[in-house]
């Protein structure tokens, strides 16, 4: 299994007036060809910053302080602007939570997809139109010939997300990064979009990095899961293993927060506290203040990501491995 994308010891800082924010600290993972990695964690833990880093698109004042990102063994951080431009979209494409912000309201959705096709695949206008209609049909837009000429506001949220997927897929990228692709949608539509992503990922043998705050979402889709907390991975491994037996107290907490069928949503458990923004490397475990299993020992020194059974990794000295 080839390592399509490898991220080594990524560290991203936002130097701010009051104090720095260490958004990502020492994140390492690889994305195998044709598989899905789910990146999970509460809001503010560094998921989006990790995703933007892969495309070398961290917004100022953010800086990638350390680490390396390799796409097919080529260092993304040493690519020229031209190389980056042709990699983005064509090799690695990205879709976001709110499709309306990525679609231009004054152009028809068809012309926007065609534009992207002409740019990446160097097709002429007529061929690009035909290809765009095929893409609309692929993502389940009914009556694609007619809908080609519609404007973004004439589509529902779910249909707009389908359009974004069509656009992202138009250049046949080998990696799709989906950052909270269904968060803005209602539950039924969420399921349809996730099914679509899963189907396309399988058919095209594409690699998918699926980012979500909702552990329930990755359960059926991801081959592997990385659980993120305050800028670092706290648990990483095969989905089935993690679901069968979560090791990190934070992962356990996330599982308890997933509503079960028939459960009263008002009685939903959540982990008390919020993800802290960190300005410097902590002395010990960052989760310690919220951890039910923590003790003084956890605050003494930084906790590494520890290798444990079945190819799993966990950043906790208290779990049974
Ligand atoms: N442009 C920015 N300026 C300052 N801080 C930022 C910026 N973008 C992200 N951050 C900080 O980085 C951390 C991680 O953010 P993010 O990756 O967006 O979280 P997530 O996607 O997991 O919700 C947060 O503490 C956030 O406040
Ligand atoms: Mg985010």
Image (spheres, rainbow, N blue to C red):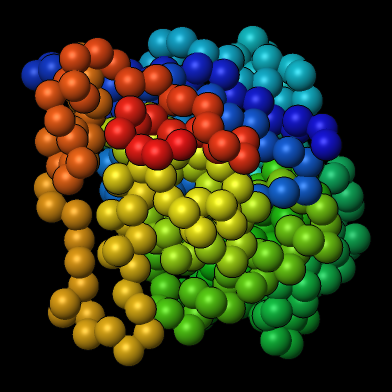
Q: Residue at x 40, y 79 (%)?
A: 186
Q: Is residue 204 left or right of residue 288?
A: right
Q: Is residue 74 left or right of residue 300?
A: right
Q: Is residue 34 left or right of residue 56?
A: right
State the image coordinates of residue 75 (x, y, percent, origin top left): 68, 15
Q: Is residue 158 left or right of residue 213?
A: right
Residue 186 visible within the image: yes
- Vertical arrangement, residue 5 with respect to residue 82, above or below: below
Q: Quadrant of residue 30?
A: top right
State the image coordinates of residue 166 (x, y, percent, origin top left): 69, 63
Q: Nearer the viewer, residue 13 or 131?
A: 13
Q: Quadrant of residue 85?
A: top right
State the image coordinates of residue 293 (x, y, percent, origin top left): 20, 41
Q: Nearer the viewer, residue 35 or 208?
A: 35
Quadrant assignment for ligand 1 = top left
Residue 47 visible within the image: no
- Vertical arrangement, residue 314 with respect to residue 188, above or below: above
Q: Residue at x 9, y 19 (%)?
A: 18
Instruction: Look at the image and tell me in which quarter the N terminus lies.
Output: top right
Q: Residue at x 46, y 25 (%)?
A: 306
**Farthest residue, direction left:** 18
- Vertical arrangement, residue 130 with respect to residue 60, above or below: below
Q: Residue at x 54, y 67 (%)?
A: 161
- Vertical arrangement, residue 164 with respect to residue 20, above or below: below
State the image coordinates of residue 188 (x, y, percent, origin top left): 48, 84
How many numbered tags mark residues here? Answer: 0
**Farthest residue, direction front:** 320
């Amino acid at each position: 299994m080839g390592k399509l994308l490898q991220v080594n010891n990524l560290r991203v800082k936002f130097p701010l007036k009051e104090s720095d924010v260490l958004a990502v600290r020492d994140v390492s993972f690889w994305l195998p060809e044709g598989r899905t990695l789910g990146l999970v964690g509460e809001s503010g833990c560094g998921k989006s910053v990790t995703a933007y880093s892969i495309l070398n698109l961290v917004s100022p004042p953010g800086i990638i302080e350390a680490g390396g990102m390799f796409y097919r063994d080529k260092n993304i951080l040493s690519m020229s602007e031209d190389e980056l431009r042709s990699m983005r979209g064509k090799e690695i494409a990205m879709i976001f939570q709110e499709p309306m912000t990525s679609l231009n309201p004054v152009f028809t959705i068809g012309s926007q997809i065609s534009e992207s096709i002409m740019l990446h695949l160097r097709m002429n206008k007529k061929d690009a139109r035909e290809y765009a209609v095929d893409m609309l049909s692929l993502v389940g837009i009914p009556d694609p010939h007619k809908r080609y000429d519609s404007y973004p506001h004439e589509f529902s949220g779910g249909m707009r997300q389908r359009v974004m997927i069509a656009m992202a897929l138009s250049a046949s990228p080998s990696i799709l990064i989906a950052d909270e692709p269904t968060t803005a949608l209602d539950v039924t539509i969420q399921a349809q979009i996730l099914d679509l992503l899963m189907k396309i990922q399988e058919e095209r043998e594409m690699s998918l990095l699926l980012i979500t705050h909702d552990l329930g979402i990755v359960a059926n889709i991801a081959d592997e899961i990385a659980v993120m907390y305050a800028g670092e991975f706290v648990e990483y491994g095969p989905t089935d293993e993690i679901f069968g037996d979560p090791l990190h107290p934070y992962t356990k907490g996330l599982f308890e927060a997933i509503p079960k069928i028939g459960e009263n949503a008002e009685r939903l458990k959540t982990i008390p506290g919020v993800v802290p923004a960190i300005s410097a490397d902590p002395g010990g475990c960052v989760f310690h203040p919220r951890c039910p299993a923590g003790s003084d020992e956890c605050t003494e020194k930084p906790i590494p990501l520890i290798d444990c059974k079945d190819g799993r990794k966990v950043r906790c000295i208290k779990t049974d491995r």
